[in-house]
Amino acid sequence: MGALGDRIRIHTGDITKLAVDAIVNAANSSLLGGGGVDGAIHRAAGPELVAECRMLHGCKTGDAKLTKGYRLPARYVIHTVGPVWQGGGKGEAELLASCYRRSLEIALGHNCRTVAFPAISTGIYRFPKDKATGIAVDTVTDFLQQDPLLETVTFCCFDEQVAELYRHAVAVLGEG
Ligand code: ADP
């Protein structure tokens, strides 16, 4: 097992291109597809993905469910449902942390060693990006420290601004 810093990767690009054991989808509670990263994942995986999702009967906010990756380079897709930002007083931070934890628990349950996350809830769901990236890094770090079987976690960002927020969150780890 490498040092903690080597096990966290920050990547700018399209998550559907990543050849990891599992990519995480920022889905909605129907699991039947949507816009943003969800739409991109369904387009790249092909129609078999929504067919498998139909059999899952949705997913609660803060929870996650696994499917195969079909035409994606990733073996699995873990669909998690982030909270819609409503000002911060509705348990949004806890629910977002739960998305990261549940996704990693499920990944490990399927022997995944490499997992990539998009910046859950920071698009259509309007979670403030600085807060969301801080929660993502803190939650994933706690998990990595407890679980030596998980090799690397990639934070996949669509734009450089979010990548910079992740770099900052990693840099201040341990200072707070
Ligand atoms: P949510 O509904 O959870 O807010 P979105 O898909 O709207 O989900 O946005 C989540 C994040 O994913 C945003 O930061 C957005 O820029 C990013 N994103 C969109 N498409 C992709 C993609 N193909 N790969 C990686 N990240 C993406």
Image (cartoon, rainbow, N blue to C red):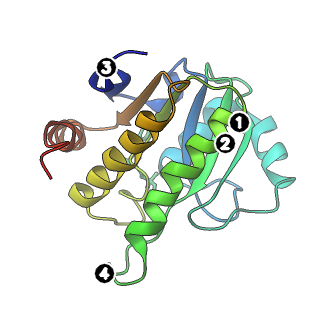
Mark 2 C-beta to ligand 1 under 8 Å: no
**Residue 63 appears in the picture as rendered:** yes
| Residues packed near mark 3 inside 10 Å, few (<14), some (14 to 19) or many (20 plus) | few
| Residues packed near mark 4 inside 10 Å, few (<14), some (14 to 19) or many (20 plus) | few
Measure how far apart labels 1 and 3 are at the Cα level.
Answer: 23 Å
Measure how far apart labels 2 and 3 are at the Cα level.
Answer: 23 Å
- Depth order, front residue of 44/133: 133
* Image height of 49 relative to 53, above or below: above
Mark 1 C-beta to ligand 1 under 8 Å: no
Count of marks placed on residues:
4
Residue in view at x 62 percent, y 43 percent? 105
- Depth order, front residue of 114/49: 114
Measure how far apart labels 4 and 3 are at the Cα level.
Answer: 36 Å
Residue in view at x 60 percent, y 61 percent? 28
The image shows residue 128 at horizontal and vertical percentages of 26, 63
SS at badge 4: loop
The residue that mark 2 highlights is 106
Q: Nearer the viewer, mark 4 or mark 1?
A: 1
The residue that mark 4 highlights is 87
In which quadrant is the N terminus drawn?
top left
The residue that mark 1 highlights is 109
Is residue 164 shown left or right of residue 85?
left
Occupied quadrant, residue 169: top left
SS at badge 1: helix
The image shows residue 170 at horizontal and vertical percentages of 21, 38
| Residues packed near mark 1 inside 10 Å, few (<14), some (14 to 19) or many (20 plus) | few
Label whose residue precedes the other's in the sequence (4 or 1): 4
Q: Nearer the viewer, mark 2 or mark 3?
A: 3
